[in-house]
Amino acid sequence: MFTRSRPRSVGVLALLSAFGWFGVAGSAASSEADGFPNRPVKIVVPYAAGATTDTLARTMALKLEGMWKQSVVVENLPGGGGLTGAGTVARTPADGYAFVIVTASHVISPAIMARPPFDPIKAFTPVTMLAKSPGLLVASKQSGFKTIPEMVAQGKKAELTYGTSGVGSKHHVAMAELARLADIKAQHVAYRGSAQAMNDIIGGHLPLQMGSISFAKDFVLNDKVYGLALVAEKRHPMLPNVPTLAELGYPLTSSEWWALLGPAGIPRAIVDKVAADVAQVLQMPDVKARMPSDELVSSTSDELLRFMQNEAEVWGGVATRAGIRIE
């Protein structure tokens, strides 16, 4: 009897201990977010000032400061197509006081690098999605073309040059794939940010730029550049006369996106708090008004993880087929 009942009592004790441990662990986890933050928080923008990522970060930081009663500092660390700033955050303590806003290049670039500086998934804690925005291809007034058919016709005669915010960005990959589908030659020029590329577009030094609609739309509306096409499933109400690549016969529809990440290992309670607070910010009417052409959309950490994994697989594959490599 003793030998039969002993395992049962040990099992009950183990079960009770397990429940007790989980209760303590749950309390400890929730307490990790109590009083957070109690010192300044940093958000790294891995691009130059002046474009969508920077605007989003500074708008969000201002609102979070009001909610948290703590300074939220935005730091621009451009370079490496966004990888330099992201890598800096990956090496910081996982305590919830340093984050980075990344774009699709975060998961695309490592897939096409000979020696990636980090694993874009494992080296980070996904916090929340922030925004999605269609890509917009624009042309300089001095380019000699105003439409995609005119661009393709010219591209079959001579190599075209286009700029984006960096090698391996969603815009770079989309444009490279467009060139492949249209059977034209196009040379990529990587800039430290969309604002710098736009300066060269307006100055007539660069014929084409692929960027986000949120940044480039005003230049189209103010007749400073030609809007050739959107990388989207349907036309955008703010640019109703600009067609999509899909309706022109080029099946490219995926939007650029922005997400908030931290270094790997941030306690889940802090991640959930930050995600919930950011979700509130994104729904504020004045924040939406600041970025009218973007879809401001939050997510859970798990949802963002699955999304990033899919983007890495799909667009990393597109970049590879397009022959894009970073040595």
Image (spheres, rainbow, N blue to C red):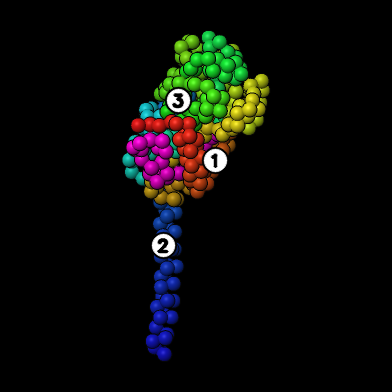
Q: Which residue is mark 3?
A: 165
**Which mark identifies residue 298?**
1
Select label 2 or label 1 by which is in front. 1
Q: Between disc 1 and disc 3, whose residue precedes?
A: 3
Residues packed near mark 3 inside 10 Å, few (<14), some (14 to 19) or many (20 plus) = many
When the figure is inspected, residue 238 is found, relative to residue 90, above or below; the finding is: above
**Which mark identifies residue 285?**
none
**Residue placed at 35% from the left, 36% from the top?**
114
| In the image, farthest residue toward the bottom | 1
- Residue 97: where, in percent of width, then height? 38, 41
Quote the CA–CA distance across marks 2 and 1: 30 Å
**Residue placed at 48% from the left, 42% from the top?**
313
Q: Which residue is mark 2?
A: 24
Q: Is residue 117 magenta?
A: yes
Q: Is residue 245 toward the left or the right of residue 192 in the image?
A: right
Whether label 2 touches label 1, CB < 8 Å:
no
**Residue placed at 52% from the left, 22% from the top?**
184
The residues colored magenta run 110-132
Q: Is residue 93 toward the left or the right of residue 34 in the image?
A: left
